[in-house]
Amino acid sequence: MISKLSIIENKILTPAKLAPLLNMWRFQGREIVFTNGCFDLLHLGHVDYLSKAADLGDELVIGLNSDASTSSLKGPNRPITDERSRAHILASLFFVSAVVLFDESTPFDLINFVKPDVLVKGADYTIDKIVGADLVISNGGKVETIEFIEGYSTTAIEKKIKNS
């Protein structure tokens, strides 16, 4: 019997282990959706955003900033939770097909590798500011933005904890 934890862990992949899945999904005519982020302290805003991203296709691949990448983007006190924890939590969501860690400051190389049918970011970005948008569009894909639920952010949670 396969444990539930092993099912979760089998969704946390390196690019090399993701490649055969991408090929299989494409062969099956499945639409691949890609989004990325730090996803530190998963909250309702993240779940809403990710579930809406998953609704835009058949397979949701999340590029997850590594601890080093998150720290360089968010500051020395971040991430609050380590990359292993963040990857496991994201992979436990039933609508997530794969989680891939990346160390770079942007997911450009990972987007180039995945070549998604749909690239998704939050609506706080305009398409001209979304890393990899031009690549996805030139490959015949589309770029979508999703509105955030107001009042939900890791920064707000962090401030609430510090002030209590």
Image (cartoon, rainbow, N blue to C red):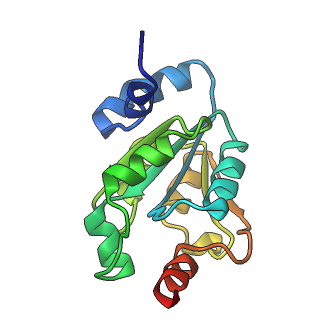
- 147 horizontally vs 122: left or right: right
Q: Is residue 156 above or below residue 110?
A: below
- 161 horizontally vs 137: left or right: left
Between residue 156 and residue 34, name the one nearer to us.
156
Position in image of residue 104 (x %, y %): 29, 64
- 1 horizontally vs 119: left or right: left
Question: Can residue 115 be seen by looking at this rendering?
Answer: no
Direction bottom: furthest residue: 163
Between residue 58 and residue 116, name the one nearer to us.
58
Q: Is residue 117 above or below residue 128?
A: above
**Residue 64: which quarter of the image?**
bottom left
**Residue 47: which quarter of the image?**
bottom right
Q: Which quarter of the image is occupied by the N terminus? A: top left
Between residue 43 and residue 61, name the one nearer to us.
43
Position in image of residue 31 (x %, y %): 63, 34
Position in image of residue 144 (x %, y %): 69, 58
- 90 horizontally vs 50: left or right: left
Direction top: furthest residue: 1
Identified at 38% across, 66% down, the residue is 106
Identified at 37% across, 33% down, the residue is 9
